[in-house]
Amino acid sequence: MKPILITSIILLSLNAFSQKLHFDFYGGAAYYQGDLQTKRFDLNQTKPAVGLGLSYDISSKFIVRGAANYIKLSGSDEIKGDVKGTSFRNLRFSSNVWEAQLALEYNILAIEDRGFTPYVFGGIAAFHFNPYSNDSAGNKVFLRSLTTEGQGLSQYPDKKLYANNQLAIPFGGGVKLALSDKLQIGLEVGLRKLFTDYLDDVSGNYADSTILATARGAQAANFAYRGSEIPGTLGYPAEGSQRGNPKFKDLYYTVGLKVSYLLSNRNGQSRKSKTGCPQNVY
């Protein structure tokens, strides 16, 4: 009898859990803001973002959500230098960002009654990035290993090599609509507060080009400053000249649609919301 009782308890617990568990899909656009792109929106540098996740209803208002996201980012100042006080740099980067996120979501309205609700969320995330650019032949070159600002060289003991595994604080909000008792769709904006200024491999001052080329190779110096690729530009900036602005950390954010599907009916009970959409009773 004991094994049967234990098995029944486990099955009932799993069933109760699944009755509040949602499968989430996210798809949209990603944007980067930093030393190579200071605008809030630049359609020319918009990249895709997709994600899969699970969310669990603690109550009708509070939801715990976890997600794994793939985000593509890029930035360029090929047209003009964006940071005041810097020379024209002709720099650009791209990066694939892999992100794991855990957050708490708060519904402002009871979606069971209204059929829709604005919501906000905040949490913690870990992400991996590895900025790269392309040489004149189109070959991909990863920038971190070049230490383009002299990180890790004995001549610059205060410059440390940045980690490409970082923590972030994701936060944002949106509006979601209940299409049925199982299906919800919403528009969401999600920002990430970062603790690194090297998302784009640009942050501080120029290293001496000769020191950099001797220690890391000519390619390192060439990718630290690419203004010389454009005819008529000035020569390589002097050692210590401003390359980026370390006072302001980089950030990235996403805008897109989120679809959430309830994996099981809550005790098979439902009722209609004021908007006519059938909603489950908690």
Image (cartoon, grey):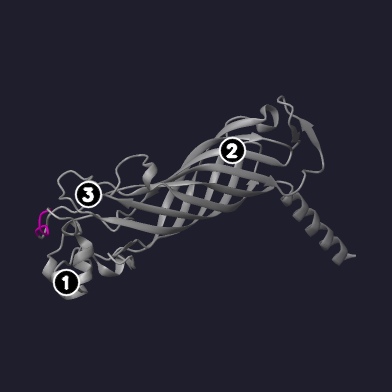
Task: Give how far apart the Cα atoms at labels 1 and 2 are.
Answer: 51 Å
Q: Quadrant of residue 258?
A: top right
Horizontal and vertical percent for residue 73? Answer: 40, 53
Amino acid type, callout 3: Asn
Image: 244 above or below 177: below
The answer to which image quadrant residue 179 occupies is: top right
Left-right relation of 176 to 269: left
Magenta stretch: residue 234 in it?
yes
Q: Amino acid at mark 1?
A: Ala
Q: Is residue 213 magenta?
A: no
Q: Would you name the residue on which mark 1 appears?
A: 213
Magenta segment: 233-238
User: From where the camera sits, is residue 57 visible?
Assistant: no
Residue ID at (80%, 54%): 12
The amino acid sitting under disc 2 is Gly
Residue 60 place in picture, x, y as percent: 66, 36
The answer to whether marks 3 and 1 mark residues whose Cβ atoms lie closer than 8 Å is no
Find residue 133 and report its horizontal and vertical position in percent: 32, 61
Residue drawn at the location 68% of the way across and 46% of the way down: 261
The label on residue 186 is: 2
User: Crowdedness of circle 1 by 10 Å Cα count: few (<14), some, many (20+)?
Assistant: some
Figure quadrant of the N terminus: bottom right
Q: Which SS class for mark 2? A: strand
Q: Position of residue 61 (x, y in %)?
A: 62, 36
Residue placed under numbered mark 3 in the picture: 245
Most frequent secondary structure within the magenta stretch: loop
In this view, which residue lies farthest toward the top?
Answer: 274
